[in-house]
């Protein structure tokens, strides 16, 4: 005996379209504006903004794919996954960076450190 479950033709396309890949959303500015453009925190991304030696950096972690972006470039990180959480280690402007992800009863906690110093997460702002 076999059972075939179907929810219609549109279900597959909705499923495929639901997993959006690509760069995280950035603050929109005028085309001739040469200033720093940080990423925007969303439900799907965690964002950290920091300054190292006078240079601004915006890092965004896609929670689903675990892609880590910094100023429009994907960062190659050494990843360690275990029962107590995950860790991504990489270099940022010559500093040792570590991104720790730890599951908890209230959701996953994300913590970024640069040479051992904690970097605060960016707060979501209302950009209209």
Image: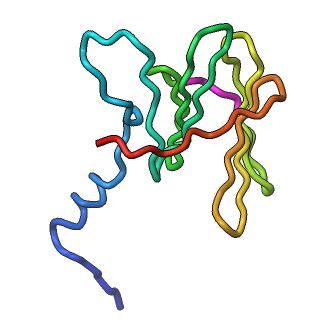
Examine the rendered structure and indicate whether residue 43 appears above or below residue 118. below
Question: What residue is at 30 percent from the left and 60 percent from the top?
Answer: 15
Q: Where does residue 97 sit, x and y in percent of width and height?
A: 73, 25
Examine the rendered structure and indicate whether residue 36 appears above or below residue 126. above
Left-right relation of 67 to 108: left
**Most common SS among magenta residues:** loop
Left-right relation of 60 to 116: left
Q: Quadrant of the N terminus?
A: bottom left
Left-right relation of 115 to 45: right
Count of number-bearing discs: 0
Examine the rendered structure and indicate whether residue 62 appears above or below residue 57. below
Q: Quadrant of residue 100?
A: top right
78 within the magenta span: yes
67 within the magenta span: no
Question: What residue is at 67 percent from the left and 14 percent from the top?
Answer: 52
Q: Where does residue 71 sit, x and y in percent of width and height?
A: 48, 20
Examine the rendered structure and indicate whether residue 104 appears above or below residue 101. below
Q: Quadrant of the C terminus?
A: top left
Q: Quadrant of residue 93?
A: top right
Question: What residue is at 17 percent from the left and 73 percent from the top?
Answer: 8
Question: What residue is at 65 percent from the left and 57 percent from the top?
Answer: 108
Q: Where does residue 6 sit, x and y in percent of width and height?
A: 24, 77
Q: Magenta segment, which residues?
A: 75-79
Q: Residue furthest left?
A: 9
Q: Where does residue 22 sit, x and y in percent of width and height?
A: 37, 35
Q: Nearer the viewer, residue 74 or 41?
A: 41
Q: Nearer the viewer, residue 95 or 18?
A: 95
Q: Nearer the viewer, residue 114 or 53?
A: 53
Q: Residue furthest right?
A: 116
The structure's colour scheme is: rainbow
């Amino acid at each position: 005996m076999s059972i075939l479950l179907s929810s219609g033709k549109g279900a597959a396309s909705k499923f495929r379209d639901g997993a959006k890949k690509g760069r995280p959303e950035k603050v929109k500015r005028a085309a001739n504006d040469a200033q720093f453009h940080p990423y925007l925190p969303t439900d799907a991304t965690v964002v950290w903004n920091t300054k190292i030696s006078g240079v601004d950096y915006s890092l965004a972690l896609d929670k689903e794919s675990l892609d880590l972006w910094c100023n429009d470039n994907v960062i190659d990180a050494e990843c360690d996954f275990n029962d107590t959480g995950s860790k991504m280690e990489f270099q940022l402007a010559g500093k040792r960076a570590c991104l720790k992800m730890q599951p908890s009863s209230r959701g996953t906690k994300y913590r970024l450190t640069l040479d051992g110093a904690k970097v605060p997460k960016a707060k979501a702002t209302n950009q209209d």
